[in-house]
Image: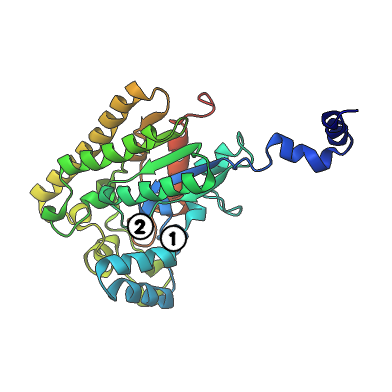
Amino acid sequence: MTRQFLILILILAIPNLFLPAVLGEDTPAPYMVTMGDSITAGLFANYSIDNPPDPETLTYLAYLAAVGPPKESTNRVHKAFKRYDLSWASGDNPNDFVVSHYERLREYIPDLAKLDLAHSGDTTLNLKKQVESLFGEIKERGAEPVYIVYLIGANDLCASDTKEVTTKKDFRKNVEESLYGILSHTENTKIFVSSIPNIFSLQMHEGEEVFGNVVNPYAGVTCRKIWKNLIPVCKTATDNGNKKRFDLMKMQLERYNEILEETVINLDKEYRDRILFSHAAYNTEILRNDLSFDCFHPSESGQAHFANETWRDGFWPFGF
């Protein structure tokens, strides 16, 4: 009886001992990745206009935002208030009503893991760092991701002055380099590129009262007052006092989305069926309940709407 035959007999006789190794037990688990900014990071998603933070939490938020250089304060706010578990892209909270891309994709890939690279405050210039982190993860895991959700660009527009807004030329360069870099260094990864939501449509909610419904000390505070005084987020989109500037920034956002779509169309010619662009986020109507307490970021309801609308434009189930 040969040695090879004996080994075969042992494998057949004791399958639980040998079979996993034979089939490749160490094969990396499939995973998906999120890239982008605070919208995909789920910042403030656990709050809404009717469910704002208590005064103590607001004081803590104000402290984090005020102390130190702007970039450091953004990182602190991100760390304290991010809610990836409620994200339209990668949410996995069993008690919410957001049915994320991650949760839907697990119906097809039950052992799917995830990696969240989306970071509050990031612009397309920061994509270089996110892509580097992705490549490091691919090397460490020994496997490329199955799926990447890519939504970024609002912060390129959000600034206190139009001089700080990312130029269309730089926006195109940053987007093209990041997407081409990912596709050229992977073989099968699919990339869902989302449009930037229409943040200018938030103007219809400027008169909504936020804290007054729940927290008496803040009675009468409207979205307009929040944008102007309390949380002056994205002045170029929330301050409509200068109509000429406001209209110019609306056009800039539309052009950003055109650049995203053009880039995807061009890349699809070379990397067929691995990348697509969706208008859904821009076209999704933002309702009152969709807003967090800052009247800017999506609440849980807003995240759910983004998840529902964008999934319809995606790869699955027909692209599986």
Q: Residue at x 38, y 29 (%)?
A: 276
Q: Is residue 89 left or right of residue 235?
A: right
Q: Is residue 195 something one can see in this rendering?
A: no
Q: Which element is circle 1 on?
A: loop
Whether tag 2 and tag 1 are in contact, CB under 8 A, the answer is yes
Q: Residue 91: percent from the left, percent from the top?
A: 52, 50
Q: Residue at x 91, y 28 (%)?
A: 1
Q: Residue 194: percent from the left, percent from the top?
A: 36, 38
The image quarter in which residue 7 lies: top right
Q: Is residue 111 left or right of residue 124?
A: right
* Pick the front one: 154 or 36: 36
* Pick the front one: 201 or 131: 131
Q: Residue 312: percent from the left, percent from the top?
A: 46, 31
The crowding category of the residue bearing disc 2, from other C-alpha atoms within 10 Å (few below 14, some 14 to 19, many at least 20), is many
The crowding category of the residue bearing disc 1, from other C-alpha atoms within 10 Å (few below 14, some 14 to 19, many at least 20), is many
Q: Is residue 161 something one can see in this rendering?
A: yes
Mark with earlier residue (2, 1): 1
Q: Is residue 132 above or below residue 320?
A: below
Quarter of the image that includes the C terminus? top right
Q: Is residue 205 left or right of residue 3?
A: left
Q: Residue at x 69, y 41 (%)?
A: 25
Residue 120 numbered mark, or none: 2
Query: Mark 1 — residue?
Result: 82
Q: Amino acid at mark 2?
A: Ser
